[in-house]
Amino acid sequence: MNEKKVYFLLFLVSLSVFIIALSTFINADFFSDDYSYFELLQAKNIANTGFPDYNNVLVVASNRFVFMPLYEYLLGAVFAFFGSVFSLKVLQALILALIPIGVFRLSYELRGEHFPALLSAMIGAFVPVIWQLSSNSLSKIPLIIVLMLFSTEFYLKSLANKKFLGLFYVFFIILSLTSNVSILFVCALVFSIFLSSIDNKKINSTEIELLSFCFAVSIFVVIITYGGQISNIGTKVIWLNTPSPVLSLEYQDFNLAQLIYSLGIFPMIYGSYSIYLLTMAQESKKRDYVIMSFVLMGLFLLWLKMVSWKIGFSILGIYLAVQFTDFFISLRSSINKSKIARFKQHIYYVAIVFFVIGSLVPSLFYVRSSLDKFADQNLLSAMVFLKEKSEDGQAVAIHPSESHLFQYISSRRVVIDSNYIALVSPEDRYFGLKKIFTENFETNAREILDELGVSYVFLTLATRKDYNITELAYAKGSPYFEIIYDDGDNLIYKYDRSSE
Amino acid sequence: MIYMEFENVSVGKKKNYFLIAIALIVLLNSFLIFQTQGNSIISGFDKKIVMQDDLPNPVLSKFSSFISLVSNMDVGWLLVFLLSNIFILLFYFAISNYSDSNVAFFSSIVLIFSPTHLFFNSSFNLIFLLELIIVLIFLLFSFKNKILVSIGFFLLICASFLNPVFFIVLAILTIFSIWRKEEFRKTKLFFLLIFALCVIAYYIIFGGIKGQLPDYPMHSLLDFLFEFSLIFGVILISIILAVVNFFIGSYKDNQKKIIALFLMGFAMIFFSLYYVSFLNIVTSALCGATICFIVFRKWEILTVKVTTFFIIMLLIVYSCAQLFYFLSIAPPSFDVLSELRNMNEAGVDFSRVISHPLYEVYIREISQNKGFYEIGSSQYLSRDFKDILSYWNQSAKFDSETLQNLNNFFYSRSIDKTLNAGKFLEVDYVLITNEMRNGLTWEKKEEGLLFVIRNKEVFERLIDDENITLIKINYDGINSED
């Protein structure tokens, strides 16, 4: 296949990703996850004031909140320029469309062949877990993936030619300012150097220097960003102070079946096979170890629960897609040498069927499911009602998975949202909220409501389902609680402290 | 081992550089030590160590009495400045002898900026004196003159009875010496074993290894890092760079010795977190050597070298800045201290005062009272009282009945339970500070004792202002009401 044709096909792959992503955004009334509304709030804040909202005033008794703000600045800049949420959706679709290009460039850098790189780009474009997390969502994961791919590419290029150093610095610094995943990048580089050294490869001085640079930059950014929090919450900062029940829920699905489903059966098979080939090969290139290190380090950190499964799975999926180039070339050479060479066209068709079943279909399934309403018009009306009914600064007990949407719509304070790092004892808060919804005795419930200063209790469909309740048991016949809104799905209680 | 050549700077103007380096080190150290002076936490730590009059180790007890005597003299602060600079100069010369002056310079800079150095070495206390002795011993051992080495050896033998860390240093140095030279191998080994038996017997009789320095609540392995909620500790970047130096080998012949000392320091923190001060000395030596390696190594990419060096130095200075920030916000505040002093001057006579353990040292020292816990303060900085109780429960610091009564006293909302606990604990007064109300002991407004003390007949408020509340417990209050 000639070069022009490959680039044209790559363009088509990117375009299809862009169209799928954008059409999902257009067809949905709401984002598919609650955190998108946090990003939206931050983007608007940056557009208005020039700074993210670090004070976290919309959560009861919260400390200053910290995060790496580069993605939010990007959203804020686009929002300030175009002034519409749609522009943010276009930007997100564009970032998603950059993923196959990043995969193609890195794969081409590794082997210097266009066609296998194009196939890798196709697989990279449809990694199920990335669509699961990013479809119809303002998630920073696609940007992290793109930055990691470009950083890896320019790292490899810099080892051979120093004129790419500048680009490597730029991409790595942007990555460090976007997410603390830069630590994983450094760990992968250390691991690749370790693998090279045990394979008796000469360690290039530039490798050590670039590693020192990456290490210093990432540690610096992490300590400067989280320094204040580290002294408050200690080692819990690694898990961003996430309460243990939430953490256990997050990792309970981390097993082989989930891994295969999220990454696709095809990448799992060829990924494992190419790692096997690399370890058994007589002569492996150092750059192969770099890609392998990302895969193994991703798995290792996932196993240690040191990296969020969202990031861990996405990185695994994308580097396995890059690994496909290697697998394809070794498979092609094996087939060419064997007697089944005359069937090789058929073997490619089988591979495409595998790709369609293992990657494309699950990805499209996730795209489809992202259109299922995370929120509906009823919920929105209830939230708007509560906004009008309540006063500024009043606190509302609402399910954590709907907190950011509620903050976005009503600008009222909630008991807990997903930014646990800003809370002194998120576990107490988590169980406190659970008690507000499930407590049987009025005195106990009131004690918590008083302690947290909650004025309204908001029962949504998600709350009822998660906590297995239909109403507040303790509110029945109590003079302190009054139902002020009930549309069948949503129920809002007003807590009146002064009633006797 | 990755070995890369050093590219040493020109030694033409070595003498000038030496003087500039010394001047810079002394100035920087004096400036930073001066900044820590008068801080309540550090002075509290100082007093706490001075008050260690019940040490099980008789040699250490005598040594502590001497420190107490000197500390009470008005010239104490001048002595601290002098000794702190002597300490840093001894460290500089020792490292200079073991490696070279460039490594010594960078190691000294790392040590000066380290929170542990600024915390321990800015007041006249036991740990500082032990550190001073160990650095002096390292210096004496770094010379080639046999008399000086013998003096160092003699000092180390004597100091072995002060703290087990000296004996371990002695053992490490002797084992390396035996390893290298076959001369008198058996005799040396024989004497080491005999001496080891004596030292072990000595420490078994007088408090064990764990009893030689105050206890410190350590929750996880990473607790010794300054970044993870400690007021002192080793900087994360220093530890990483120190480990990197294992592979660089800046100390040539002494590399294995210094790695052994590093591992020893690391192991000792399991006995008491105060041993972090020794670990910090070795870490600074190794970290400084790595920074020196970064500076003088021939880099292929100059921008990477400059950026890396700049960022590492920034991280080290940042930790120092963070320490000063902690010190500025750390309880107890100066207002509380001045109230305590006023109590003392007013001659309020109270036999037993209970408060958060953080204030114990001030209650005992400033108000000249007998304290309840008879334990120190700095280790309880910013620790929730519930955490401390759970730590004591694990470490069997108090018996379970005392712990139960402590818990009842502070957290029960029943006046009977509180009074019974108070009687059991033989407590007559309660000191409550703002910091205790705001999370140090209680999180809620009317939690436990805060609810109970609303009964003003039983809990008579002797002092009640915006900073502190001093309450006298009238155990007959309830009976008289009846």
Image (cartoon, rainbow, N blue to C red):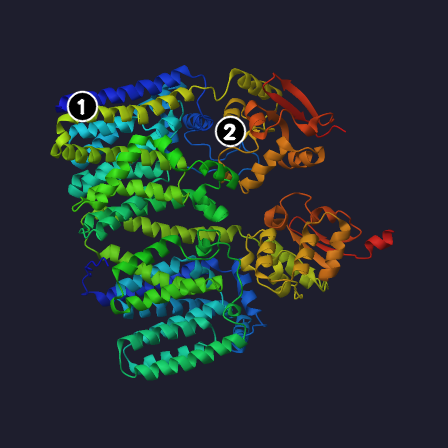
Q: Residue at x 56, y 37 (%)?
A: A430
Q: Which residue is mark 2?
A: A401
Residue A7's disc number: 1
Q: Residue at x 62, y 64 (%)?
A: B366
Q: Residues within 10 Å of mark 2 (few under 14, many from 20)?
A: some
Report the front residue among B193 and B319.
Answer: B193
Cα distance in 3D space between marks 2 and 1: 42 Å
Position of A148 with respect to B415 (left or right) is left
Q: Position of residue A295 (x, y in %)?
A: 30, 40
Position of A19 with respect to B430 (left or right) is left
Asked if residue A129 shows in the view, the reply is: yes
Q: Amino acid at mark 2?
A: Ser
Report the front residue among B212 and A325.
Answer: A325
Reply above or below: A295 against B82. Answer: above
Q: Amino acid at mark 1?
A: Tyr
Q: Position of residue B456 (x, y in %)?
A: 78, 49
Query: Which comes sooner in the sequence, label 2 or label 1?
Result: 1
Farthest right residue?
Answer: B482
Reply above or below: A15 against B80. Answer: above
The quadrant in which the N terminus of chain B is found is: bottom left
Q: Residues within 10 Å of mark 1 (few under 14, many from 20)?
A: some
Q: Subunit of mark 1?
A: A
Q: Residue at x 27, y 32 (%)?
A: A321
Farthest front residue?
Answer: A339
Q: Subunit of mark 2?
A: A
Residue B168's disc number: none
Q: Position of residue A204 (x, y in %)?
A: 18, 49
